[in-house]
Image (cartoon, rainbow, N blue to C red):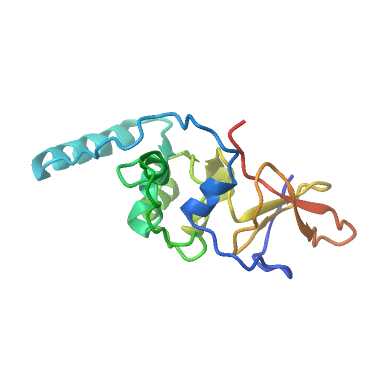
Amino acid sequence: SEELEGMSASKKPAVDYGASSYAERLTPRREKGGGLGNPEHYDDDGAFARKTLRLAELIRSSKSCVILTGAGISTSAGVSDFRGPNGVWTAEKKGVKPPASKSFDIANPTLTHMGLVGLVKAGRVKMIISQNVDGLHLRSGLTREHLAELHGNLFMETCEDCGAEYLRDFDVGGISFRRTGRTCEKNGCNGALRDNLLDWE
């Protein structure tokens, strides 16, 4: 079984990465999928209240609730999304500079992240499935057993020999499961560590 190790390491990268820098690591691809730049929809207060109560009832009556999160959950933390009206890929398509994004390593979990932790702790939600790589779910206190990170995590590296996982307080760099230049800290292992980020393919 894989172990989650501490957040210290001797060779910390010198660069802070935000959403634009992460996007630049992906293999260049013309088609990004989805509707780039679609306008955001906002409900009036009455509709918002009705939908919130309906959602609460659905969660309360569910036998096994699973929640899927995407980039929108982190935008209020200052992290840019990719496909929104001001997203990184939307800007790229328009030929303009991507918006400023808070560096992933200094972004803090949002109220939504914390609310999801509360739902998990209360036994109302069994699992959070996330498309995000920003590490905010783990920083919120959500445990690995309740989190599936579909695209990986910028702050996680894994030993190629023993499978030990290391959650760092910095972006480990790389993409596509490349070696990070650090080695496993478990006694007697010393295996090479790899990032755990998926590329497009």
Q: Residue furthest front?
A: 95
Residue 31 rendering spot, x and y as whole percentages: 48, 29
Residue 98 rendering spot, x and y as whole percentages: 40, 51
Instruction: Depth check: give the residue in front, 122 or 77.
Output: 77
Horizontally, is 160 left or right of 154 in the view? right
Q: Tag count in the figure?
A: 0
Rendered-image quadrant of the N terminus: top right
Horizontally, is 126 left or right of 159 in the view? left
Rendered-image quadrant of the C terminus: top right
Task: Kindly identify the residue that appears in the image at 44 percent across and 50 percent down.
Answer: 121
Task: Kindly identify the residue that appears in the image at 56 percent across and 40 percent down.
Answer: 151
Task: Kindly identify the residue that appears in the image at 47 percent across and 32 percent down.
Answer: 32
Residue 137 visible here: no
Residue 76 visible here: yes
Residue 100 rendering spot, x and y as whole percentages: 39, 59
Identify whether 102 is placed above or below 62.
Answer: below
Residue 168 rendering spot, x and y as whole percentages: 63, 61
Instruction: Depth check: give the residue in front, 82 or 167.
Output: 82
